[in-house]
Image (spheres, rainbow, N blue to C red):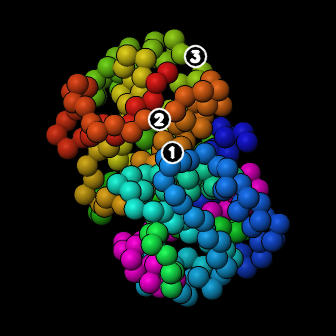
Amino acid sequence: MDYIAMIQNRKSVRAFRTKKVPASIQGEIKAYYENCPKLLPEVKTQLLVLDESAQKTLEGTAGYEKFMIGAPNYLVLLSEENENAEINGGYIMEDLILKLTELDMSTCWITFADAAEVKEALKLDTAMKVVAICAFGYGEKTSKLLRLNIKNMSNVDITAKRGYYSPKKGIYDMVSLNKWGNIEGLDEMMGFYEDMLWQSFYAATLSPSYLNRQPYGFVLDNNQVTLVSEPDSYTDKVSADLGIGIVMRHFDAAAGQCMGHGKWALTQGDNALELPAGHTAVAVYKL
């Protein structure tokens, strides 16, 4: 898969056509899941592919403000209990979304506040829990790709995506050198690694997150990249962990395509990077 192209081309929509998704595509995504990249392959997961009836089933338990977006199909990812289940779930589901993009499908992440309620609504008889949901199908065509920017509940704007100008946060808003908040010398350091770092960080800026808040950043230091989680009053822990998994997949998909190697390692946190209060180092990527 050309991950760099798929990250730029992924079609996140809020309205789907009623056109059915062919069984061949549903089968292909199921088969792809079996061997798709997984952040924590030792954590058992299971993928369900549901039809349009899931909208009615999940109404009131999933969706933004519990409003379910209607779509021809939904992916539901289950996971065994693990402290990093949602991070792993975000990583896996975003990879599946990129595969659906390659298959010319539009997608939409579906949020939920209570995994137990979702599991009960779906009448799932399993010890696993629901960690991620995605709607997919053929999106309604619009004249512009719009992006919702929520700085706070009284400061909301909508911008049109235009080529390389679409990120809510640019590279210099998201990446620091040696310590948090420092960008002096960042150009030179990224130039040392040539195109790989720029492509990887740009892919990270395109990662979707709850309300497009993107509450995370990176510190480039000592031949490694540290991913840092930022506190955000609008993002709960489940959404934050899913977002961490998503941005990790964007970064290492691009880095892997450029370098051919590299992998994230989750960390327990390290304040050697002079992180502000509430900021936590969550993963390290060796260059």
Give coordinates of residue 265: x percent, y percent: 43, 35
Determine the secondary structure under disc 3: loop
The N terminus, quarter of image: top right
Q: Amino acid at mark 2?
A: Trp
- Specify the segment rendered in magenta: 100-122
Q: Quadrant of residue 12?
A: bottom right
Kindly report which numbered mark, 3 or 2, lies closer to the viewer in this rendering.
Answer: 2
Q: Are marks 3 and 2 in contact (CB under 8 Å)?
A: no
Determine the secondary structure under disc 1: loop
Of mark 1 and mark 2, the one earlier in the sequence is 1
Q: Are marks 3 and 1 in contact (CB under 8 Å)?
A: no
Q: Is residue 233 visible?
A: yes
Of mark 3 and mark 1, the one earlier in the sequence is 1
Query: Looking at the image, which is closer to me, 251 or 138?
Result: 251
Query: Looking at the image, which is closer to me, 200 or 157?
Result: 200
Residue holding disc 3: 194
Q: Is residue 216 above or below residue 76?
A: above
Residue holding disc 2: 264
Residue holding disc 1: 39
Q: Are marks 1 and 2 in contact (CB under 8 Å)?
A: yes
Q: Give the residue at the far left of this rendering.
A: 277
Q: Is residue 265 above or below residue 64?
A: above
Q: In 3D space, how far apart are the residues under numbered discs 3 and 2 (Cα atoms)?
A: 20 Å
Q: Amino acid at mark 3?
A: Glu
